[in-house]
Amino acid sequence: RGHLNDLENIVPFFGIGLLYALSGPELSTALLHFRIFTGARILHSLAYLIPLPQPSRGLSWAVGYAVTISMAYKVLKTSFYP
């Protein structure tokens, strides 16, 4: 289950992350997005492997999803309002 969940979240991140990187963000902002997403997914995977208290898995998923939405917003904003 954990592996399938990772695939459901990481594959869209790669697509949006590529578009985000091509949109010309500041390097520090891009690194922050990528690092936060990576940390959240590692924590989420550990929450599946080690029985961590329940809010940790949900919060780590939400943080990763929020990063993906933030990058998608930046891509859409850049493409519609250059």
Image (cartoon, rainbow, N blue to C red):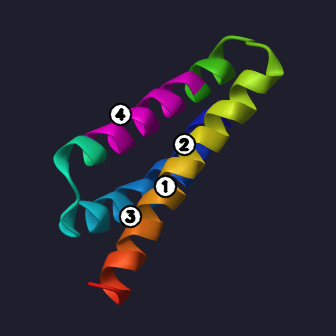
Say which label, 1 or 4, has the lower sequence index.
Answer: 4
Q: What kind of element bears circle 1?
A: helix
Determine the CA span between mark 1 and mark 4: 12 Å
Residue 49 occupies quadrant: top right
Residue nearest the viewer, comparing 34 with 48: 34
Three-letter residue code for mark 2? Gly
User: Along the horizontal axis of the image, is 70 left or right of 57?
Assistant: left
Counting other residues with Cα less than 10 Å from the Cα at mark 3, is it few (<14), some (14-19), or many (20 or more)? many
Label 4 close to label 3 by CB (< 8 Å): no
**Residue 35 — which label?**
4
Q: Which residue is mark 3?
A: 16
Say which label, 3 or 1, has the lower sequence index.
Answer: 3
Counting other residues with Cα less than 10 Å from the Cα at mark 1, is it few (<14), some (14-19), or many (20 or more)? many
Say which label, 4 or 3, has the lower sequence index.
Answer: 3
Label 3 close to label 1 by CB (< 8 Å): yes
The residue stretch that appears in magenta:
31-43
Three-letter residue code for mark 1? Thr
Q: Which residue is mark 2?
A: 64
| Residue 50 horizontal/vertical position (percent) | 67, 11
Label 2 close to label 1 by CB (< 8 Å): yes
Residue at 79% x, 14% y: name it.
Answer: 53
Q: What kind of element bears circle 2?
A: helix
| Residue 8 horizontal/vertical position (percent) | 57, 53
Q: Which quadrant is the C terminus positioned in? A: bottom left
Determine the CA span between mark 2 and mark 3: 13 Å
48 above or below 72?
Answer: above
**Residue 68 — which label?**
1
Residue at 37% x, 44% y: name it.
Answer: 33
Say which label, 2 or 3, has the lower sequence index.
Answer: 3
Residue 31 occupies quadrant: top left
